[in-house]
Amino acid sequence: MSAVISDVKSNEEIYERLREELEKNHWGEWAVIVKGELLAVAPTMEEALKDAGEMPPDALSRMVRRIGEELPKVVRKL
């Protein structure tokens, strides 16, 4: 598995682990997760990105997601 895919999966796993709490307390807000760590939650995407700060140079991906929004099922070949 490539490092990028591993990084993306780590971010997705953290979101899923925190999902119930995030949806209960922050429905409709935006979350930023980098390197498997929740960095920010804010009412707008712009605020969340600002609060999260610059992406660390060793980070390979960043998850920016609206809490409570279901993502479309995507089929991708990796």
Image (cartoon, rainbow, N blue to C red):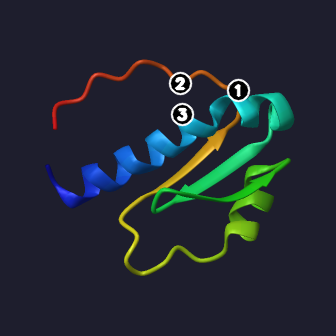
How many numbered circles does the render carry? 3
Q: Residue at x 80, y 60 (%)?
A: 47
Q: Is residue 58 left or right of residue 39?
A: left
Circle nearer the N terminus (2, 3): 3
Q: Secondary structure at mark 1?
A: loop
Q: What is the CA distance from the residue labelled 2 to the residue labelled 1? A: 9 Å
Q: What is the CA distance from the residue labelled 2 to the residue labelled 3? A: 13 Å
Q: Secondary structure at mark 3?
A: helix
Q: Which residue is mark 2?
A: 71
The answer to whether the residue labelled 3 contacts the one labelled 1, judged by CB atoms less than 8 Å apart, is no
Q: Looking at the image, which residue sits at the far bottom?
A: 57
Packing grade of label 3 (10 A; few <14, some 14-19, many >=20) is few
Is residue 23 depicted above or below 9 in this figure?
Answer: above
Q: Is residue 41 left or right of residue 6?
A: right
Position of residue 63 measured from the top left corner of the image (x, y, whole percent): 52, 50
Q: Which residue is mark 3?
A: 16
Packing grade of label 2 (10 A; few <14, some 14-19, many >=20) is few
The answer to whether the residue labelled 2 contacts the one labelled 1, judged by CB atoms less than 8 Å apart, is no
Label placed on residue 68: 1
Q: Residue at x 68, y 68 (%)?
A: 52
Which quadrant of the rendered structure holds the C terminus? top left
The answer to whether the residue labelled 2 contacts the one labelled 3, judged by CB atoms less than 8 Å apart, is no
Position of residue 32 measured from the top left corner of the image (x, y, whole percent): 63, 54
Which amino acid type is shown beneath numbered disc 3? Glu
Q: What is the CA distance from the residue labelled 3 to the residue labelled 1? A: 11 Å
- Mark 2 or 1: in front is 1
Circle nearer the N terminus (3, 1): 3
> Which quarter of the picture shows residue 59?
bottom left
